[in-house]
Amino acid sequence: MTREHGDVEAVSRRRLALAGGVAGLAGVVVSQVLTDLLNARATPVQVVAEVIIAKTPGAISEPLIRLVGRNDKPILVAGVTIAIIALGAVAGLLTARRRLYGHLVFWAMAAIALVAAITRPDFTAYSVLPLAAGVIAWTVVLDHLTGVARPQPTLQASRRRFLLNAGGVTAAALVVAAGGRLVGQGRRSAESARRLLRLPVSRGVVPAGAQTASGTVSWRVPNGAFYRIDTALVVPAVDPKDWRIRIHGMVDRELALTYPELVARQLTEAWVTICCVSNPVGGDLIGNAWWSGVRIADLLEEAGVHPGADAVKQTSKDGWTCGTPIQALTDGRNAMLAVAMNGVPLPLEHGFPVRMIVPGLYGYVSATKWVVDLEVTTFDKFSAYWTDRGWSERGPVKTESRIEVPGQGTHVKAGSVRVAGHAWAQHTGIATVEFRVDGDPWQQADLGRVPNLDTWVQWSGTVQVGSGDHTLVVRATDRSGYTQTAARADVVPNGATGWDHITFAAT
């Protein structure tokens, strides 16, 4: 083989790989556009990413989440997309042997996506259409570009023709993607319906004295700043007119409620702090808000719970599940089907139109967003999403505290230094908070006022420090008499323990 012939072959291989990669991108874009136009919940790429999330063991997913934080979902979607483009490049190279081999790569990817779609709880026949459109785009673009990629009479003309075609397909795909996002307004209907709602709820008044120090997180956390942790790669967009909830299982009579029927019932409102079990010591996966909704205890009483039932299995619109002790739903705490947050209908990302709020329990066993099903049962008859991944069956919130002022690694002026933060023991209540610097004796903090046992409390105080580096530590004691342990424990299987501490410098 001559050098010139070898150069031509190398160029041809690069073009075939590029042709396959562009075909992969074109298929992704076409499926995205049709997803938007059909008002479908998720694209095939997103569905595959959701299944990856669902099948990843907790021992693997938890460290990954800690590593990338709240960017885990976009990173995963980007990773699946890159994998499709890379496999497309392989498909392009395989067409050099036989065109069918290249198509087999894309068909294999389509089969994986189809299986993933079928396993999702909201699968319908329409779910196949974006995938089918993507496969057609893969086939057509792959055949066209690999045909153009093969050597032409002159290498320069061949190169120019291929680049024009590949560039044109790529540009067209991006334009179509942008246009599809503009045209596909259907998914915004839920947000439009939310904005039009006028619920009979109040905004709640922050108690005088609850906010005790400047520089700390607001005692009431605004909706836009409230933490969000869930497994939904695509936020379910549920129109209130289509929402239904079913309460069934070990009950005398099954209940089924529409959204208007729910909000027409007697509403309860309360300040409640909720916390994620993945919150590390000193972490920010916690927030306090004014919630409005219907008491679960009233609904269960109306349904008539059978003796022996000890759990309620909650199911979300997207299929996520959790198990909640029935005692926590009926013991007088303000457990509710929430419809509003801080005086407005729930934001979509926080569970619109309806979610569960249960004071005193971590969210993984209580705080189902987009909830559509409550089954009264027993814990030995089911397992839920996170318990399948090694987390505890029951998740009472642990007594914890954190330091917010001064911040980690900050510099302050020597002398009197203001220290502050939050402590929480939902449905038990905080009795005292203590802090100390550099191992000195513990000092008791001043506590802000709280309206009930279900919210966090701000703490504050002052310390005298000289020039140099210092370490500040905090611990809380709840109203049962329990004082936080200094022993550090991981968030798995039922929440972190340990004293929060920070270092700062004084000059």
Image (spheres, rainbow, N blue to C red):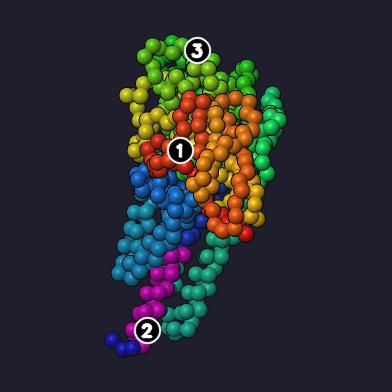
Determine the residue positioned at 45% across, 50% down. Answer: 66
Determine the residue positioned at 56% across, 44% down. Answer: 403
Neighbours of disc 2 within 10 Å: few (<14), some (14-19), many (20+): few
Q: Which mark is residue 7?
A: 2
Q: Amino acid at mark 3?
A: Glu
Distance, label 3 to label 2, CA atoms, is 79 Å
Q: Which residues are magenta?
A: 4-22
| Residue closest to the far left | 1
- Which residue lies under the disc numbered 1? 277
Going from the N terminus, do you reach mark 3 or mark 2 first? 2
Question: Would residue 262 be seen by someone viewing this image from the given angle?
Answer: yes
Callout in the foreground (3, 2): 3
Decide: is 310 above or below 91. Answer: above
Of residues 395 and 96, the one drawn nearer to the viewer in this rendering: 395
Pointers 1 and 2 in contact (C-beta within 8 Å): no
Q: Quadrant of residue 348?
A: top right
